[in-house]
Image: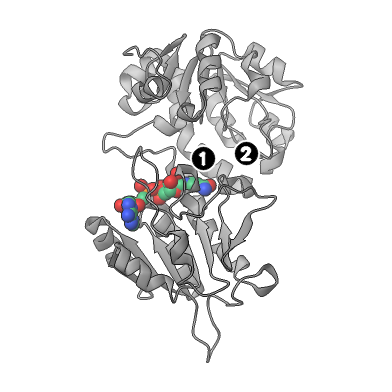
């Protein structure tokens, strides 16, 4: 199969859909991979690395879309790309269709086969192509939180690990899923005293079994949240209710109970956020202050560490890319239920119920 890897042209997106090692895996199976010039540069991969792995470098994005039977990307196509996508071309990327009617209609009109990373779903209901980005965001949340606890950026002036003779900082993690566990691990590693709140007892038992002694688990309810925010230096929001908006666990009124300079990092901002005062921010201007509380709520945290994010993402996408290339999209989706769940729009028809429902459009069973 002819596979195309274009440069990501969405503002500030430095990740790339395939690493040189992915190219190597495909070319050794006799597929041809066309990579746009400089596509990997933002993630630290040079054209030479791709050429050495067997790729053919093309000058323009038009060249890549023109020649490829399957496009491998990271972010959803933006307007400039809509007209480049051809009928029957497979596009495998994050789409998040439910958040854009314009994109949905453009992809219907393209007659392409749109397979979305975010809806590829294992039989146990887990979303394997979302996990690595949650892992990155969870770990990053502590790195960012620690930075914004510094006084020059209006934080409390607390060093999370403390020093001999000075107690460590306290970190409260709301939600003990992928984001929460990774955040807790990083905070615990720095020496902070960490509390994780969740409503899933099975998950709390697991965390209690595997985490170090400076990570404490408690059931999540308003009483416990109010108790902990009073003495926390850093609060991480990592809750998720599948398919729903995040519950507002910390209200504006509750900010008054927190100490000035406390930092709150709302990783769940992409689902509306779990703090009432959350509004999405960018890496250019990541924080704002309300009632002396420093809010960090960047909606694409992994974008700041494109090398790590690209490798983490392509580690999990590549096995599916190989299946699609070897078997063709129809057979690959028939043979792999997880991949079949990734089908969103096929040749002008919406085949994923929730997307059709979001815009009151026709749904066709795949
Ligand atoms: N900002 C970013 O760049 C970025 C990157 C990756 C993920 N995310 C977001 O982070 C959020 C968390 O993702 P995840 O992969 O960790 O999800 P997850 O499903 O693995 O974990 C969510 C956890 O929240 C818990 N939860 C639900 N309601 C709760 C409540 N009331 N109190 C406490 N815990 C509660 C669940 O039981 C679950 O354990 C999602 O909204 C995801 O989209 C954001």
Mark earlier in primary sequence (2, 1): 2
Q: At numbered mark 1, what does the secondary structure look like: helix, strand or loop?
A: helix
Q: Position of residue 358 (x, y in %)?
A: 41, 25
Which residue sits furthest bottom?
165
* Residue identified by numbered label 1: 313
Q: In which quarter of the image is the C terminus?
A: top left
Q: How far apart are marks 2 and 1 (CA)?
A: 9 Å
The one nearer the camera, 357 or 251, is 251
Q: Position of residue 56 (x, y in %)?
A: 69, 22
Asked if residue 168 is positioned above or below residue 225 in the image, the reply reads: below
Find residue 320 and report its image quarter.
top left
State yes or no: Cβ of the residue under disc 2 lies below 8 Å from any atom of ligand 1. Answer: no
Q: Position of residue 353 (x, y in %)?
A: 34, 21
At x 56%, y 66%, the residue is 291
The one nearer the camera, 221 or 85, is 221
Q: At numbered mark 2, what does the secondary structure look like: helix, strand or loop?
A: loop
Discs 2, 1 touching: Cβ within 8 Å: yes
Find residue 180 and report its image quarter.
bottom left
At x 66%, y 42%, the residue is 43
Asked if residue 338 is positioned above or below residue 244 in the image, the reply reads: above
Image label count: 2
The one nearer the camera, 67 or 137, is 137
State yes or no: Cβ of the residue under disc 1 lies below 8 Å from any atom of ligand 1. Answer: no
Residue 188 visible to an observer of this rendering: no
The one nearer the camera, 228 or 143, is 228
At x 56%, y 28%, the residue is 76
* Residue identified by numbered label 2: 15
């Amino acid at each position: 199969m002819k596979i195309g890897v274009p440069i990501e042209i969405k503002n500030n997106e430095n990740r790339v859909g395939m690493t040189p090692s992915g190219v190597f895996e495909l070319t050794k199976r006799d597929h041809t991979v066309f990579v746009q010039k400089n596509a990997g540069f933002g993630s630290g991969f040079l054209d030479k690395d791709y050429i050495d792995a067997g790729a053919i470098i093309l000058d323009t994005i038009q060249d890549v879309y023109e020649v490829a039977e399957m496009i491998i990307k990271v972010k959803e196509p933006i307007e400039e790309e809509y007209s480049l996508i051809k009928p029957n071309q497979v596009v495998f990327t994050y789409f998040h269709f439910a958040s854009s009617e314009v994109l949905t209609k453009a992809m219907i009109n393209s007659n392409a086969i749109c397979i979305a990373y975010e809806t590829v779903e294992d039989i146990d209901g887990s979303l394997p192509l979302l996990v690595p980005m949650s892992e990155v965001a969870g770990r990053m949340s502590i790195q960012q939180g620690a930075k914004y606890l510094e006084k020059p950026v209006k934080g409390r002036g607390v060093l999370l690990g403390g020093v001999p003779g000075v107690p460590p900082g306290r970190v409260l993690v709301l939600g003990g899923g992928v984001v929460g566990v990774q955040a807790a691990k990083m905070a615990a590693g720095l020496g902070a005293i960490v509390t994780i709140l969740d409503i899933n007892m099975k998950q709390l038992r697991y965390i209690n079994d595997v985490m170090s002694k400076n990570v404490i688990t408690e059931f999540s309810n308003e009483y416990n949240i109010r108790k902990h925010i009073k003495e926390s230096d850093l609060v991480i929001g990592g809750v998720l209710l599948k398919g729903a908006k995040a519950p507002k666990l910390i209200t504006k009124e509750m900010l008054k109970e927190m100490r000035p300079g406390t930092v709150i990092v709302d990783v769940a901002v992409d689902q509306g956020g779990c703090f009432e005062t959350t509004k999405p921010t960018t890496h250019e201007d990541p924080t704002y202050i309300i009632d002396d509380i420093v809010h960090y709520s960047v909606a694409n945290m992994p974008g700041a560490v494109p090398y790590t994010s690209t490798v983490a993402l392509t580690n999990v996408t590549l096995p599916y890319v190989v299946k699609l290339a070897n078997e063709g999209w129809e057979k690959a989706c028939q043979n792999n239920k997880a991949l079949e769940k990734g089908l969103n729009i096929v040749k002008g028809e919406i085949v994923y119920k929730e997307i059709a429902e979001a815009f009151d459009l026709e749904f066709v069973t795949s």
